[in-house]
Image (cartoon, rainbow, N blue to C red):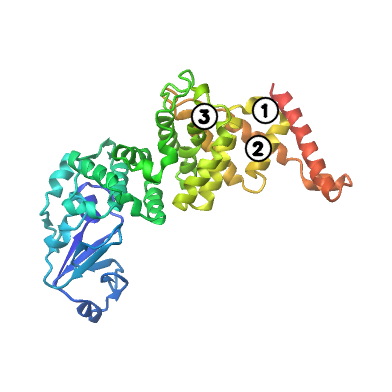
Amino acid sequence: MNTYLVGGAVRDALLNIPVKDKDWVVVGATPEELLQQGYQQVGADFPVFLHPHTHEEYALARTERKSGQGYQGFDCRFSPDITLEEDLLRRDLTINAMAQDEHGNIIDPYHGQQDLNNRVLRHVSPAFSEDPLRVLRVARFAARFATINDRPGFTIAEETMALMQNMVNDGELDHLVAERVWQETQRALTESNPHIYFQVLRDCGALKIWFKEIDDLFGIPQPEQYHPEIDCGIHALMSLQACVPLSTNIATRWAALTHDLGKALSDKANLPRHFGHETKGLKPIKALCKKLKAPKDAQELALICSEFHTHVHRALELKPETLLKVFDRVDAWRKPERFEQFLLVSIADSRGRTGFENCDYPQTDYMREALQVALSVTAKDMMAQGLAGPEIREGLQKARAEQLKAWKISQA
């Protein structure tokens, strides 16, 4: 029995970046032998075991054969006679198909180190096309490795991109399930260059399959005076990237990406203007989040940002009553964290434009201060005035509006 460190741990060590998780392959063993040594079996479809002391995952060497559609349609074979090379052959990319033995020697039958040095994402074998989830995985790796230690990162091999495009055209991605698509998307949103994930999906044609509402933005023009990048799709990706230094929160980054979906529904006769795109975006956001089974917080924040991001842009000119309306709809009173996320998305929207990447955005500080001014008037103040029941809310709104009015005059 021999054990080998495999996959991402080998790749990341060779790239001199932190190794997060270690996975192992066991060659020449049976499940019974590992169980006798104290390993705990956790795999249902094929034998995966947890080490009795480190609790790292150890999988028996296996091969896979396509037996159906989608990413689950595989028959797995494992036995002591399956070689390490056979196990590595079933992996997605050459840079993930390397192993390291107990002496530190690298086993690299498919030239992963060469592709590592050349910064290329290349599929190991034609079997890549048997698993449609790998299209999303390649896009995610492209986002993860777009830059490495402040140096240019990986590109996708032409033949791999062509294979991904063929998979899309053959309808393979139609068989994915929403949970797995969102899982890959969620992981991509945590990367330092998440916009690359969506750009790669567009390049291979997958964006229109699972993210049609985002894909529809491309080719839609905006006024060049305010959006030198012109294209709405490009602006969406730029807004997502502008959000990266502002927040690591997945819902915030998702809202930055989807805040302008309504622009794809604008009347063509009015282009490049987009009247009412804020509320027009609510329906496609709901449809996209439902299709992907996105979490509730991601959908709620995206809807809020779509409907009210232009209010933040115009914050300095808003009437007190309008400011209070925004605070109410965002529920800034009870959910200050979400209010802050909402403001960060507005910053990302402003900076997600060519030439405006580092622009100042005083509107957020203005909105934060306005909220604190409104919060200085409390329900207790209304009760002290003898108000009760529904009168409290009505009085609170009126008093807060007066307080904001006085504050705005002092700011002038």
Looking at the image, residue 86 sits to the left or right of residue 328; the answer is: left
- Nearest to the observer: residue 323 or residue 403: 323
- The image shows residue 386 at horizontal and vertical percentages of 89, 47
Q: Earlier in the sequence, mark 2 or mark 3?
A: 3
User: Which residue is at a point 69% across and 24% down the rendered structure image?
Assistant: 411
- Give the total of numbered labels: 3
Q: Circle 2 sits on which residue?
A: 326
Q: Quadrant of the N terminus?
A: bottom left
- Nearest to the observer: residue 337 or residue 175: 175
- The image shows residue 368 at horizontal and vertical percentages of 62, 36
Amino acid type for the residue under numbered disc 3: Ser
* Front disc: 2 or 3: 3
User: Which residue is at a point 25% across and 79% down the rendered structure image?
Assistant: 35
Separation (CA) of disc 1 from disc 3: 25 Å
- Nearest to the observer: residue 385 or residue 179: 179
Q: Circle 3 sits on which residue?
A: 266
Residue 304 seen in the figure: yes
Looking at the image, residue 71 sits to the left or right of residue 265; the answer is: left
- The image shows residue 387 at horizontal and vertical percentages of 87, 47
Q: Is residue 222 above or below residue 384?
A: above
Q: Circle 1 sits on which residue?
A: 318
Say whether marks 2 and 1 touch (CB < 8 Å).
yes
Q: Is residue 326 above or below residue 71?
A: above
* Secondary structure state at the residue bearing disc 3: loop
